[in-house]
Amino acid sequence: DPRERCLVRCMIRLDLMLAEEMRLAEGGFREQMFDAIAEVFHAVERDVGLPSPWNAQKAAAALHAVTDGLFVNWALGSQSFTLSPDGENFIRELFITWKH
């Protein structure tokens, strides 16, 4: 939906501005997303371990880079592109998470 994409563009810009200029204690959405991903990988590392050379921080950084990149490129990209159904569901879930 183009309206949703436009809203996400505004939200990303606002999130970046507030997180950078106001130094929010809880960080912006992108920092919160990283923290949530890192928490999962820390639990996996603690409970079952991660294969070498991965640790929780490296794994979280890699997944966050892909997640954030897909989301930001979808929202802020100069050209529209069509995602696979899984990609659309992924963006939808990120959007739902952001709203909460």
Image (cartoon, grey):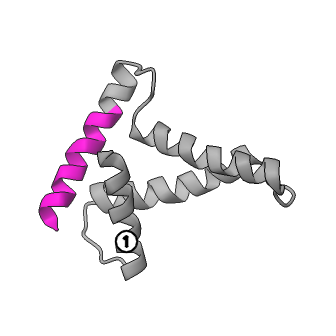
User: Where 15 sits versus 3, above or below?
Assistant: above
The magenta span reads: 1-16
- The amino acid pointed to by label 1 is Asn
The N terminus appears in which quarter of the rendering? Answer: bottom left
Magenta: main secondary structure equals: helix
Q: Residue furthest right?
A: 52
Q: Residue at x 31, y 29 (%)?
A: 17
Q: Residue furthest bottom?
A: 84
Give the camera-side residue of 41 and 55: 41
Q: Position of residue 82 (x, y in %)?
A: 30, 78
Give the camera-side residue of 91 and 36: 36
Q: In the rendered view, does 8 fall on the left or right side of 34?
A: left
User: Where 24 sits versus 9, above or below?
Assistant: above
Q: Position of residue 76 (x, y in %)?
A: 29, 54
Q: In the rendered view, does 57 fall on the left or right side of 70?
A: right
Q: Position of residue 18 (x, y in %)?
A: 31, 26
The residue labelled by disc 1 is: 89
Q: In the rendered view, does 60 fall on the left or right side of 74?
A: right
Q: Residue at x 23, y 49 (%)?
A: 9
